[in-house]
Image (spheres, rainbow, N blue to C red):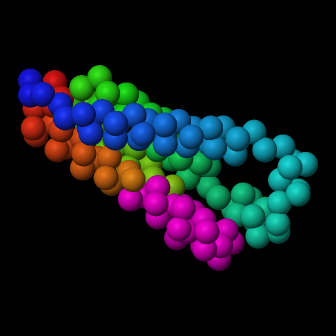
Amino acid sequence: MNAVPAWFKVVAVLALLWNVLGCVAFFADLRLSPAELAQLPEAQQALYAARPAWAVAATGLAVFGGVLGCLGLLLRRKWAVVVLALSLLGIVVQDFGLFVLVDGASLAGPVAVVMQAVVLLVGIALLLLARKASARGWLV
């Protein structure tokens, strides 16, 4: 097993925190009461009503897979590559459901589109990092 550079551990910890925040946001989203939903702007209410259940499940796969995959990076385990690939798949499926089928871009606005683009880029970067770490022998 090759020595792991210090930056790798720092990035893995930051990525873990990022994904934990994603889990917090996911649970907050699931716990919205009907009264809280009624207080949202009409466009957001329409987005919540139109999003398919499988897109919500894909969000769960994305955030929980991200947490588990980042833990795998910190533990230096090769399975982190597969788990982060599943997490990225969750992001893509979620985005397809929200932005292609439901047209969430017009309902949620440009900030949501930018945020989801950042989420997608982070997911891609984490998978590439895990693959690089595996190739360099940092993961066992």
Q: Relative to residue 116, is residue 67 depicted above or below? A: above
Left or right, 139 with respect to 114, comes to left
Q: Write down the quadrant of residue 42 in the picture.
A: bottom right
Q: Is residue 22 left or right of residue 128?
A: right
Q: Tell me: 98 left or right of 38.
A: left
Q: Position of residue 104 (x, y in %)?
A: 62, 69
| Location of the N terminus (image quadrant) | top left
Q: Residue at x 74, y 59 (%)?
A: 49
Residue 21 location in percent, x, y? 56, 40
* Residue 92 visible, this orientation: no
Q: Splitting the image into 4 quarters, where does residue 38 fall?
A: bottom right
**Nearest the eye: 91 or 113:** 113
Image quarter of the C terminus: top left
Image coordinates of residue 95 in percent, x first then y, are 50, 61
Q: Eyeballing the image, is 3 above or below 126?
A: above
Q: Residue at x 32, y 27 (%)?
A: 74
Q: Which residue extends farthest front?
A: 6
> How many numbered badges does the structure rendering display?
0
Answer whether residue 94 is magenta in the image: no
> Visible in this render: residue 136?
yes
At 38% from the left and 51% from the top, the residue drawn is 123
Q: What secondary structure do most residues of the magenta stretch adopt? A: helix
- In the rendered image, the vertical position of residue 74 relative to residue 60, given as above or below: above
Question: Which span is picked out in magenta?
Answer: 96-121
Indicate yes or no whether the magenta region holds residue 99: yes
Residue under the point 32% across and 46% down? 126
Depth order, front residue of 11/105:
11
Q: Residue furthest bottom?
A: 106
